[in-house]
Amino acid sequence: MNLPESSDSNLPPSILARIRWMRLLQIILDAFLVALVFIGAYLIRFDGHVDGPYLHQLQVLIPTLVCVRLLANWGFGVYRRLWRYTGLTEIMELGCSVLAVSTLVLLARAANLTRIDDNQLSFGIIAIDAGLCFLMLTGPRILRRLQTEHKQRRHWRQPVRRRALLVGAGDAGQLVLREMNSRSDLGVDVVGLLDDDPGKVHKRIGSLTVFGTTEDLPKHVENLVIDQVIIAMPSAPASEIRRIVDMCRKAEVETRILPGLYDLINGKVSVNQLREVSIEDLLGREPVTLDTPAIAGYIEGRTVLVTGAGGSIGSELCRQIMRFQPKELLLLGKGENSIFAIHQELKGRPEPVELVPIIADIRDHNRLFNIFEKHAPQVVFHAAAHKHVPLMEANVPEAITNNIRGTQNVAELSAEFGIETFVLVSSDKAVNPTSVMGATKRIAELVVQDLARRSKTKYVAVRFGNVLASRGSVIPVWRQQIAAGGPVTVTHPEATRYFMLIPEAVQLIMQAGALGSGGEIFVLDMGNPVKIVDLAHDLIKFSGLRPGQDIEIKFIGLRPGEKLYEELLTAEEGLTKTSYEKIFVGKPQPLEAAVLNSAMEKLFKCAATDDENGIRTSLHELVGGSLLQELEV
């Protein structure tokens, strides 16, 4: 039987010949087994003695049945599989093929098409033939799979080796390929590459061939019997990663990706960093180009204090600050477990930095004073804050004491002790705030802007939107909901948010610290806003499920204090470019010190007595008229 050549046209001649011969042998053996089974069905039905009329019936029907079963196997894709990789999918294909033909035979019997010499085909023969045919066709395939596994293992507990296709024949791909070839313990054999550069197609890299472009990925996954696709394109845009991942998902093949440039901050490409494709890979954020000397200029050799060092932003700040080798890094936080975790992680780093874990509450002025006096920090990154919008709506006094009083304590002590640079981590929710949390972050900005006018310390604030997969963000919540079978809850079908990755946000925070001269509010380029419901769809698909079918999406309405969409600047602040394309600066809009201090004292008194109505009224008076409708009770 001649097999079609179109699907294999890009494969080397040796592989083509081998695949064709293997398929031909599969078909010949299947034909023999189908014939043998049909004969066996007659022998079983008639206790080993087939009389003349039924023997003639057997001789007439057997060629037709063999041809129909082989055609059914072909139609169900049985001959596109290699026996040594037989699994549940292949067994199901054979089962469907056998069942379809047996059903067709039953219909033919009902239509009186199987009557030979006035003898109708027996129902017993049809049933026996179907059962035996399934067992006889699957048996050799399973035995071949077991033989393959036995050869690939030194003992039965070792994993079967997987066949991989590497997408990306650039520098990163070649480095991964070189390391994987030297790591037989990984259990992965790279059998070929794909690349969208026409100049690389059909070329060889070492012993492997670049078979084609990513458009041909499904075809090569099938023809080369691929178990895993490895994406080695660290700088590829998210749209390209999404396209490749969608093709892999449809081809039902496992996908691994080399981390993007944000993760490869140490410049080393390693197969140990290969991981599953995550929702972060599809966000569409371009790599950040840092002015490394400028950042090193205010961090290297200095004592650096990070508040909220155990949080998502704070811990990543600590990781990246370590690269610039400060003399001492103070890890300050209220939660002992999170500070312990980041301290243990950083202790394993090679940089010669003295690490000091500090458990303290930023609302405790005396404790902070002693810390500043003992360690004399020169640079402060203030990331400690309560950030949950709905929680702060339900715990208003806590938001005031932590986000405002805590910031005031750290900022004023920085001025008192002559800190060189103070960087406040702010939020886009500070713009025209509709929530208590957003209003407190705006007042925190006003505090540092006020101090910048009357202090030698360089105060700057950095404002950005949501950080994907940070602690308490929507992604971990959705993952738990998906694990529980759904539904996945989304506030509003039109709700949009700005998202960025944690490493990217931290890199830009550090860069803004080098840019400022004092009093600026730096705004990070958040790219295009993302619909929350689209993000939910992506995450469900990443879990191997179908939105709306396997997992329901339920709209629950905006929660207290939440906006339908976010803003990064007020109209009054304007927007001015800096020398870095991803960082902009807003025009400061400070308040008079007397007005600010008076309003804050009023807020603190209301917080001390748990006067929520008084707090909301004071916030409205201080931050602006846009809060009147949302914040008044």
Image: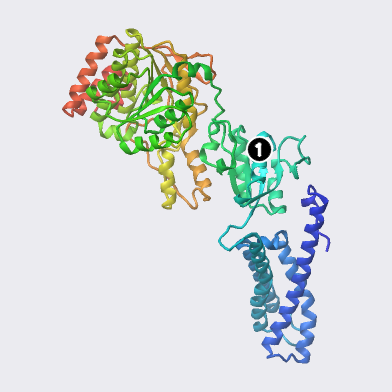
Where is 545 relative to 281, above or below?
below
Q: Quadrant of residue 412?
A: top left
| Picture quarter with the C terminus | top left
Q: Residue at x 77, y 79 (%)?
A: 61
Q: Residue at x 25, y 30 (%)?
A: 398
Q: Amino acid at mark 1?
A: Leu
Left or right of 177 in this view: 328: left
**Percent x, y of residue 131:** 64, 76
**Percent x, y of residue 85:** 66, 60
Residue occupying the far left of the picture: 609
Where is 347 relative to 154, above or below?
above
Circle 1 Cα neighbour tier, 10 Å, few/some/many (<14 / 14–19 / ≥20): some
**Percent x, y of residue 98:** 67, 70
| Picture quarter with the N terminus | bottom right
Q: How many marks?
A: 1
State the SS at label 1: helix
Q: Quadrant of residue 359?
A: top left
Q: Quadrant of residue 574?
A: top left
The reply to whether residue 470 is visible in this rendering is yes
The reply to whether residue 113 is visible in this rendering is no
Residue with the mark numbered 1: 175
Residue occupying the far front of the picture: 352
**Percent x, y of residue 444:** 32, 20
Q: Residue at x 69, y 35 (%)?
A: 170
* Viewer-proximal residue among 584 and 562: 584
Q: Residue at x 71, y 83 (%)?
A: 40
* Viewer-proximal residue among 346 and 104: 346
State the scheme by which the image is colored. rainbow
Where is 226 relative to 103, above or below?
above
